[in-house]
Amino acid sequence: MEDKLIQLQQEIISCRKCPRLVEWREEVGRTKRRAYFDWDYWGKPVPGFGDPQARLLILGLAPGAHGSNRTGRMFTGDGSGNFLFPALYRAGFANQPDSTHRDDGLELRDCWLTASGRCAPPGNKPTLEELNNCQPWLEREMSLLPALQGVVLLGKIAFDSLLRLPGYSGMPKREIMFSHGAFYQLSDKLPWILCSYHPSLQNTQTGRLTVKMFDQIWQHARQRLV
């Protein structure tokens, strides 16, 4: 399975299916942000990473233009990651609270971190067509995590992406609503779902998502794993 995960990661990195995203991610990588002028931007799709024997999947939105699109690792190098990784560390899902670049020594424990979209989108808003192009990646990724028991969904877009996957897509949508802290065990054959607001700066700096609220999500997830 680990070899297949590596193969999948390489396929994701090589993807050029969405012309708008290809143009944007590469343009950002060329022009850069002044603070990162000395960086060699990744500028490609960003694959998931973590523990191949993970019992927990963490699903976010998409790479940030000057975060993952710069560093080449999910949630690494931006404000969202600066909020996420300390929380994972406190809950025992990471070996360190900091995530600055691909070779900084970070290791995820019992979890796999990925996103609905694999390329940085303009305005942080991928189109539905672009998200649909990424759906097969998520489906294959989950199939290659044999120990998976649950999924933490970071935001409504991640929630919607999961519910478009086989197995989840047939569930009654009126009974499954996104809200922070919402938990669903839809079937004995499917990983359970735990919802959280996305740790974006828009949410964390306004107090919509606090450290305490976020820690409670990871404590809940930890308690659900068997």
Image: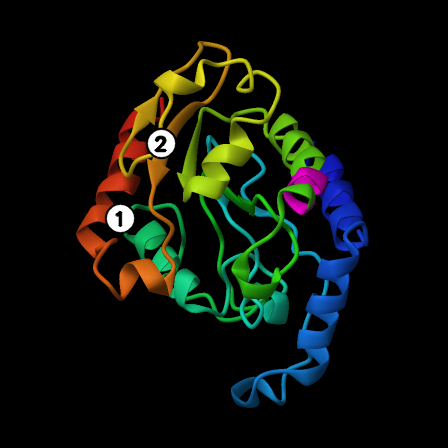
Pointer 2 residue: 194
Question: Alpha carbon of mark 2 to alpha carbon of mark 1: how far?
Answer: 12 Å
Main SS class of the magenta portion in the image: helix
Name the spot of residue 225 as percent of width and height, x first.
35, 26
- Look at the image and give the residue range highlighted in magenta: 130-134
The disc labelled 1 sits on which kind of residue? Answer: Phe
80 is higher (above) or lower (below) than 18 = below
Is 41 in the magenta?
A: no
Residue at image coords 55%, 35%: 161
Q: Quadrant of residue 101?
A: bottom right
Q: Earlier in the sequence, mark 2 or mark 1?
A: 2
In-image side of 151 versus 91 (left or right): right
Query: In the rendered image, is residue 27 in sight?
Result: yes
Secondary element type, mark 2: strand
Whole-percent x, y for residue 26 in the image:
74, 71
Indicate the secondary structure of the residue bearing disc 1.
helix
Mark 2 belongs to which amino acid?
Leu
